[in-house]
Amino acid sequence: MNKLTYPIDLGFIAEESERLVAENEQFRSYLRSLDQDLDTTVQALNQRISSAVDCTACGNCCRSLLINVSQEEAVALADRTGLSLAELKQSHLEESLGGQLIINTIPCHFLEQNKCTIYENRFAECREFPHLHKDGFRDRLFGILMHYGRCPIVYYVVEELKGITDFRTNTNLAI
């Protein structure tokens, strides 16, 4: 049996994101009006789609997002790299006045040929992205749609969810 795969055409996805801004805003409103459990549906879509998208053929999240790093993750990374925490902060991290740490470059220092060089020890925010496995999808839709034009998984989950919820039929969109 052939495994289903989804094409990773970042140019197409970015263009569709621009083209469908108004539609996606209507979709947000439409989902707020639905009286059904979206989390179970989205999580099932995410599981199926994320297993069929080769993130190493993309790496767009690592090339375009700010990555938050916890103090514990910074200490662990310093230990793994043999750097002191101060050296790591100087070379790889930026610290806000409030103490929040982020990777200080986009793309991420640890991205090489679309692969994470610290994958087994990657940061929690990286492991969790694109956050579609979490509850509260409806409440987080604004943030999720920010990644619609960046992440093939988000794009395909949202597009399939439009079909499952009969969004286009029920809103009489001209396609």
Image (spheres, rainbow, N blue to C red):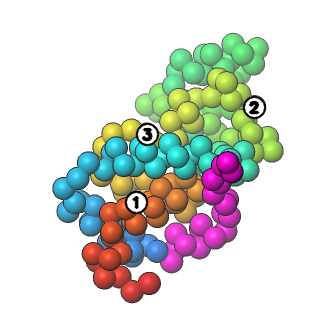
Left or right? Give the position of 136 relative to 152: left
The span from disc 3 to disc 2 (Cα, nearest Å) is 24 Å
Q: How many marks?
A: 3
What amino acid is at disc 1? Leu
Give the residue number, with chain letter if any, for mark 1: 161
What amino acid is at disc 3? His
Q: Up-down: is 116 above or below 62? A: above
Mark 1 or 2, closer to the camera: 1
User: Residue 24 lies in magenta, yes or no?
Assistant: no
Tell me if label 1 and label 3 are in contact, CB under 8 Å: no
The span from disc 1 to disc 2 (Cα, nearest Å) is 33 Å
Mark 3 or 2, closer to the camera: 3
Residue at 79% across, 40% down: 112
Within-10-Å neighbours for mark 1: few <14, some 14–19, many 20+: some
Give the residue number, with chain letter if any, for mark 2: 117
Magenta stretch, residue numbers: 1-19
Q: Which mark is residue 133?
A: 3
**Res. 128 in view:** yes
Q: Position of residue 140 (x, y in %)?
A: 34, 49
Which of disc 2 and disc 3 is earlier in sequence? 2
Residue at 31% across, 82% down: 172
Q: Quadrant of the C terminus?
A: bottom left
Q: Quadrant of residue 171?
A: bottom left
